[in-house]
Image (tube, rainbow, N blue to C red):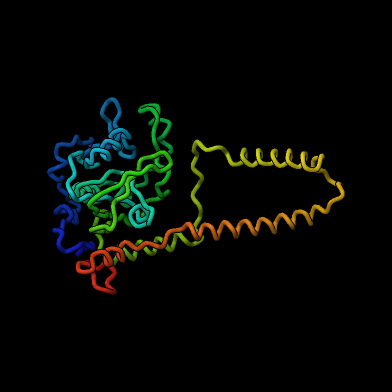
Amino acid sequence: MAGSWKRPRHPRQSAPHGAEEGKCPVPDRMKSLDRDKRGYPIPCIVMRDADGRPFFAVNDEGRRRECIVRKLCGICGQRLAKDLWFAGGPRSALHQRGAFRDPAMHYECMAYALSVCPYLSSDSYRSNIRPLIPALEARLGTLLVDNTMLPRRPDVFVAVMSYGQSVNALDGDMVIRPLRPYHAIEFWSRGKQLEFVTGLDTVRRGAQRMSADAPQPAPTPNAGTPIWDLVIADMKGRDALGLRKYRTRLQANNGRDALLDAYHEALDLCVYLRQAIEERKLAEPVAWNPITEMRQRHPRHAAPDGAEGKPR
């Protein structure tokens, strides 16, 4: 039996009946949505071209922002009530500074998406939006590609429920942070809700793999200034500074010991690196554990000590 951490006074909500058999009925809220040629309901924030063809990998940015601001479900487009459900990768849900790009959802809409959406539920999903960008831009105009997404699909998706949200700007984009503490947490993988402890262990193992010496993803092109250009500009600036200070540019056989000069500069580099490390330590927040926080904020309703959020 799948489980989630919930405060007991909140009515338990279950995934759509039949999801475990791969036969997930469309929730009533979603029945008014248009369907694609396969019969899938088209979420309200999905980008569509002039002919109405949906591109499930691309959000309609205007519609996405409208749902966030007006507090509408990102799937069915209807008004949300008190319970706001968010679904995403572990970093969005469980990192202390984690945030979501997709709007909040009704539970039944979110559970349907986690059960049926190919990206969220299918092992065979292999789509990559980046090779399609030129053709999509020609058809739809300028696209907003989310470069914060993991280069591969996470092993488990985390769904969290909050009673509120804050809207923040991040690198010029609008993101959402559910108000904490969370009032429910669920783990989903391959279209099914996991036992709470199983999902939590999967997240922990994934975090350990990411902290190991894993291969870095390929760099993503963006609008920033190329680093080589910045370094070359710095070199020219240092050259000009040396000319003003020593009345000559750096040349070989200038009477100085270049190796000794380089060694002294390397010592300075070590000092500056250590300074940056210490300053970063001071700037880093205390490690945040959402399950521990729920236990501390709601001790009468929390999981028993040692259960670490075991389903109740």
Q: Is residue 208 visible?
A: yes
Q: Is residue 39 visible?
A: no
250 left or right of 1 in image? right
| Residue at image point 23% right, 38% down | 70
Looking at the image, the residue that sits furthest to the bottom is 306
| Residue at image point 52% right, 38% down | 224
Q: Position of residue 284 (x, y in %)?
A: 46, 58
Count of numbered marks: 0
Q: Position of residue 140 (x, y in %)?
A: 35, 28
| On screen, residue 48 above or below 30 | above
235 left or right of 209 in image? right
Looking at the image, the residue that sits furthest to the top is 50
Which quarter of the image is occupied by the N terminus?
Answer: bottom left
123 left or right of 252 in image? left
Front position in the image: 241 or 14: 241
| Residue at image point 24% right, 54% down | 161
Which quarter of the image is occupied by the C terminus?
Answer: bottom left
| On screen, residue 133 above or below 117 | above
Q: Position of residue 132 (x, y in %)?
A: 40, 35
Q: Position of residue 58 (x, y in %)?
A: 34, 37
Give the image quarter of residue 308. bottom left
| On screen, residue 163 above or below 228 | below
